[in-house]
Image (cartoon, rainbow, N blue to C red):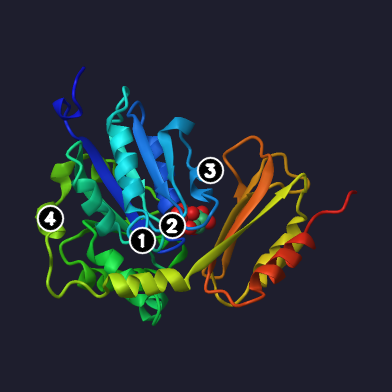
Amino acid sequence: MMQANQYAPIPMVVVGGYLGAGKTTMLNRLLTQSGDLRVAVLVNDFGEINIDAALIRTRNDDVIQLENGCVCCSIGDKLVQALAEISERADRPDLLVIEASGVSDPLRIAQVGMLDRAFRLNSIVVLADVLGLQQHLADPLIGDMVRQQMAGATALVLSKCDLARESDIAAAGELLSGMAPRAVRFRADHGMLPMSLFLDVESRPEQSIPSLLSPQPGRRWSNRASDALVHRAITSFSIRMQGEQFDKLRLKQALRSLPAGTLRAKGVVCMQGKMRPQELHVVGGRMRITDAERDSLTESVLVFIGIFSAGDEERVRDELCASIATEA
Ligand SMILES: Nc1nc2c(ncn2[C@@H]2O[C@H](COP(=O)(O)OP(=O)(O)OP(=O)(O)O)[C@@H](O)[C@H]2O)c(=O)[nH]1
């Protein structure tokens, strides 16, 4: 039998960025552009239901879900195990993409990945939502975590530029250049990026992965203790509904009145009058409901991530129950 180390290492890309920055959108773009390339995806979503895994458009066996928890601090051993399983597959992938949860440190994930010699780190791509960047950085709870995510990037991607003014994009670009001066920078329209960013290890100008992975005095804004504090403060709950359809108008109203501490909501739901399941996203006060890339759904699932107070979950449940469509 051949040993794993007889093969060339599998190129690996870690995708990070704060909640709702556009990681899954970018990943789906990559997958639609990837042609015959066999891409395996490891997804670590924040929440007990992995919505991202459901939204990724690839063959089921090519998406591996990492359980609820933060892959960078609490379930690192699960990552090690998942990597070993991927490298031992008979049909090894041509590329592995790890989508970090929005509160994980992508550099730390890359460091775990680098320990497995079956993989070669190609890039750490970190997305920044141009609309939310300033606010996220100024936030006393999450600001350091977001800076930490950026600092570990080999490529920084400004997302949602289609929604921003040119002056705001330029200002956000300035902020990014101060945080990760050696990272290559891109703007992405709905996640569209050159494939070379993922595949071509040579595409990084003077960016040296080994130096990124060694300790960098002065470049760490947070530490494990403060990360753990943030991860404890941010919690999630999920709601499943079987055999019910939502009324779109009422659901939108419910999502507009989410608790003040909500940082992100997402889901896939059955909607009255819609043939296809609907994918919904709430990010920074913006709501988007569109056709999901799947034909059927056995149950509606919604995940809410935030800093919640007692009673918030119950109130959201009540609002959602009140959004269920009554028979025509
Ligand atoms: N207009 C616009 N919307 C975008 C863009 N990228 C992502 N979005 C939208 O932003 C929302 C969140 O996108 P996702 O790709 O799910 O973000 P994410 O980073 O995977 O989210 P989490 O995994 O929850 O952290 C969705 O409604 C996307 O359609 C973009 O470039 N332009």
**Tag in front: 4 or 3:** 3
Could you say where residue 165 lies in the image, as x and y percent from the top left? 41, 70
Residue under numbered circle 4: 207
Mark 2 and mark 4 in contact? Answer it, CB < 8 Å: no
Q: Residue 104 carries which label?
A: 1
> Is 166 situated left or right of 20 in this image?
left
When the figure is inspected, residue 290 is found, relative to residue 303, above or below; the finding is above
Image depth: mark 2 or mark 1 in front: 2
Q: Please name which of the two marks, 3 or 1, marks the residue nearer to the observer.
A: 1
Q: Which badge, 2 or 1, is on the more N-terminal residue?
A: 2
Q: Which of marks 1 and 4 is nearer the N terminus?
A: 1
Which sits in the foreground, 17 or 308?
308
Identify the residue shown where x is 46% and y is 34%.
58
Q: Earlier in the sequence, mark 2 or mark 4?
A: 2
Q: How far apart are marks 2 and 3 (CA)?
A: 17 Å
**Which amino acid, by three-letter code, is at mark 1?**
Ser
Which quadrant would residue 85 be assigned to in this image? top left
Q: How far apart are marks 2 and 1 (CA)?
A: 9 Å
Q: Does the residue labelled 4 lie within 8 Å of ligand 1?
A: no
Q: Name the residue under label 2.
A: 69
User: How many marks are shown on the rendered structure?
Assistant: 4
Q: Which mark is residue 135?
A: none
Q: Judge from the rendering whether residue 181 lies leftward or rightward of residue 274; answer left or right.
A: left
The answer to which quarter of the image holds residue 94 is: top left
Q: What element carries label 1?
A: loop
Q: What residue type is labelled 4?
A: Gln
- Mark 2 vs mark 4: in front: 2
As measured in the structure, the alpha-carbon distance from the residue carrying label 4 to the one carrying label 3 is 34 Å
